[in-house]
Image (tube, rainbow, N blue to C red):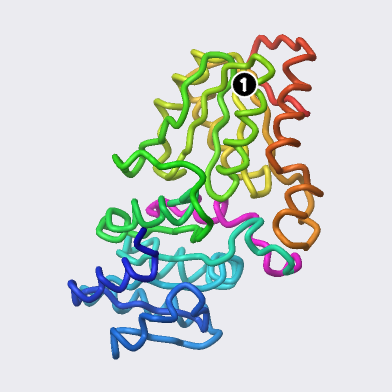
Amino acid sequence: MTSYQELLKDIALTDERFIVMTAENLASIRGIAGALGSRFVDTGIAEQSLVGMAAGLALRGRIPVVHALSTFLTMRAFEFIRTDVGIGNLTVKLCGGVPGFLSEANGPTHQALEDIALMRIIPSMNIFCPADEQELTLGLRQVLEHSGPFYIRLNHTKAVIEHDQDFKIGKAEVVFDGDDITILVYGMLFAEAVKARELLQTEGKNVRLLNMRTVKPVDEEAIIASARQTSLLVTLEDHFITGGLYSIVCEVLISRGINCKVLPIALENRWFKPALLPFVLEYEGFNGEKIAEKILKICQGGHQYATTSRINA
């Protein structure tokens, strides 16, 4: 499989509009600098200047592909993203490193758990949250060539399944079908969702799994169909509960006047305990086993709702 770095380098070498930029975050692009020469720009740890420079380059017909840690890119440079990139609807691609649980043992200062909420409130911004590096490379060319700004949650984890090759911006991947429960997920928790589904299937639950891929534009029709065809929607994300996928799903349902039972599995009012990823998932209750337990608990409770409602595991 072609890596993110290899594909980005190939795209940039065949199209001189592309400028690869970084705020001293080289982990994903270390091998590109030598190949691109002056079209590789490292501003040092200066995310605001990085985004401002990218906006200027975009105004001159370039396509900057910007790299920084997600938490500093989306928060420290937020005004520059909103004002310089967003208002002008500029074709700048913002690549956030180690988002969500992928920051692992780094503390709360490095935990990007509000990045989706911040980026999606910018009217012109689009958001790509690949499940793994296979999907990152699968959708990369479309995302980079798309007119307008895009925020990408970089994810270099290994794929647990072979993804549908028919990638479309704004279209969810229906990984498995089912008519009891729907799990909606994006990003690195996709692998845990696959495990949770397997466990739920052994308990007699027929589980649909939607990989949302792009959460903006979101696949509203996939959400609506799942709300009508399954009895429970589960939103799973390594993000604060406010402003992320749970909020998106509820907004879609309410806008269509649809009543549905929804279980959000997200972080509420707290950051996560820093540790290596397997221990984070175990401690915080986001591994496949803990996710399945939460869903089964709701299913066995026999709750009935007349309106679109949030339920707690």
Measured as percent of width and height from the top left, residue 141 is found at 28, 58
Assess disc 1: are there few (<14), some (14-19) or many (≥20) residues with their C-alpha within 10 Å of its C-alpha: few
- Would you name the residue on which mark 1 appears? 201
Whether residue 113 is in magenta: the answer is yes
Quarter of the image with the C terminus in it? top right
Q: Would you place residue 242 above or below residue 273 in this image? A: above
Q: Is residue 169 left or right of residue 112?
A: left
Query: Where is 232 relative to 287, above or below?
Result: above
Element type at marker 1?
helix
Q: Nearer the viewer, residue 48 or 286?
A: 286
Q: Using residue 236 as the reference point, say whether residue 144 is left or right of it.
A: left
- Above or below, 119 relative to 184: below
Tally of numbered tags = 1
| Front residue (pair 88, 248) | 248
| Residue 273 in sight | yes
Residue shown at the point (62%, 38%) measured from the top left:
236
Estimate the x, y position of residue 294 in percent, counting from the top left: 75, 29
Note whether residue 48 is visible: no
Tell me: 220 left or right of 7: right
Which residue corresponds to the image point at 52% horizontal and 24% vertical from the top-left? Answer: 208
Q: Is residue 93 left or right of residue 191?
A: left
The x, y position of residue 133, in whole percent, is 45, 56
Magenta region: 107-127
